[in-house]
Image (spheres, rainbow, N blue to C red):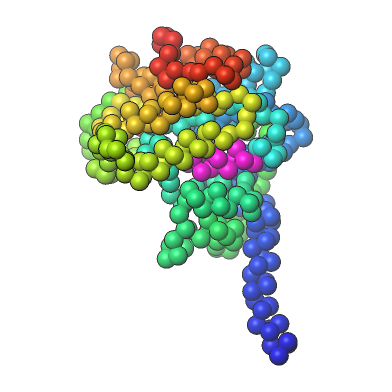
Amino acid sequence: MLRRLLVLSAPFALVLAIEALFAAGAWEPLAEPNSHAGTSIRLKRALRDPAVGRIDYVTLGSSRPEYGIDHALLAAEAARRGRTHADLTMPGTHWTSVGVLARWLEREHPEVRGGIVALSVQDLAFAYNGYYELGILQPFRRADDLPWIAARIPFAIHDVASYGVVSALFAWRDDVRAFAAAPAQRRESIAWRDAHADAHHVLFDNPESHGDMCAWGVDSLAACDRLEATSGDGEAALRRQCRELRTRASEAPDFSTGASMATPPEFMSGTRDLVREQLSDMHWPAPPVVILMPMPRIWNEVLGRGQHEWAVAILKPLADAGRIRLVDATDFFDGDADGGCGAFFDFYHSNAQGRERFSRWLLPQLAVMLYQGDAGTPASAHEDPPKP
């Protein structure tokens, strides 16, 4: 009888052992570098590099601040003050991955004094942004993060993609399959990553960005009409963005109606409560500076009615109470004579020119809000200096 029980339990024990190995990071050296998880692994390795040492300030956020904030400028300003300011932005980052990374920093870099959380109005529409985010947070999570993650990303028994909420093995499932299908190609990608794994570059430099949108415009969906009339490979990514923007515009909820209700819809109140709780619980000595990143004017036709006002309404009470510092830069480029096309290289991301303009405007505010900020002084959402 005992032998039979041992035989029957052996497969379960093996699965549990494999799960424990994946949860401990055993697969990370073999993960696809050009993936959400691969980006997180590269960042985690840089943060653990002994040459980096102390981290005083960080910038967390999505690809919008990755391209839209001059991280080298912020690093230089912090260095002038005898501090370090590291860029921890990653494409696809949303509220859950911001929170898991912040929790990881508390354990691994408790010396962090403060930082920036930079997302966009779009990112305050919903608390959950897709199961892809599990790949971003997987390398930074540990077992006791599970309840925190599960409260934000829904587990659905009939959706295998959601199993990564509770299982590291399932979180890596697709990556293991891709490795098995093309191991030689994966080894080449890993070799390239290892040859370009300079921690200083990862944490303190800017990504490259080229070109602008002035051949098409970024002020209305008419730009997509012009792009969809083309067929060249060079515009394929922009046409794909246009399809996404049109879908978002057709599905956008009316936030103004929900905000006027005594009890807003659950997706609105749930997001509001989660964001406020998460930002209030960030254990930095200085309140986080929350930046709503610049967006091209085309998003005025894409966002739901009242969505910008609702995003500010979520954050402003925290700013008024001194729990955060708020910079609403959503319309930063709206007044440009060219409609903002010279500041973006696609419908989401600032180019180098836009990055420099915005960061030069932002830096004096950070000098007060972040580097020398008084944690007890409330900040206003709209007391910003004039634009250059």
Q: What residue lies at 22% left-to-right and 35% top-to-bottom? A: 225
Query: On the rendered image, what quadrant is the C terminus found in?
Result: top left
Q: Is residue 384 left or right of residue 261?
A: right
Residue 93 falls within the magenta-colored stretch: yes
Report whether residue 345 is seen.
Answer: no
Q: Residue furthest bottom?
A: 1
Q: Is residue 28 above or below residue 346?
A: below
Q: Position of residue 76 (x, y in %)?
A: 63, 17
Q: What residue lies at 40% left-to-right and 43% top-to-bottom? A: 270
Report whether residue 305 is seen.
Answer: yes
Q: Quadrant of residue 309?
A: top left
Q: Position of residue 292 (x, y in %)?
A: 43, 27
Q: State the extent of the magenta-drawn residues as a range.
A: 91-104
Q: Is residue 152 above or below residue 88?
A: below
Query: On the rendered image, what quadrant is the N terminus found in?
Result: bottom right
Q: Is residue 117 left or right of residue 300?
A: right
Q: Is residue 373 left or right of residue 301?
A: right
Q: Is residue 41 left or right of residue 304?
A: right
Q: Quadrant of residue 202?
A: top right
Q: Is residue 135 above or below residue 377?
A: below
By secondary structure, the bulk of the magenta-drawn segment is best described as helix
Q: Quadrant of residue 218?
A: top left
Q: What residue lies at 52% left-to-right and 30% top-to-bottom? A: 117
Q: Position of residue 114 (x, y in %)?
A: 61, 26
Residue 264 falls within the magenta-colored stretch: no
Looking at this view, is 63 or 341 the one in front? Answer: 63
Q: Residue furthest front?
A: 262
Looking at this view, is 196 or 152 the one in front? Answer: 152
Q: Position of residue 255 (x, y in %)?
A: 29, 36
Q: Residue furthest right?
A: 50
Q: What residue lies at 58% left-to-right and 43% top-to-bottom? A: 100
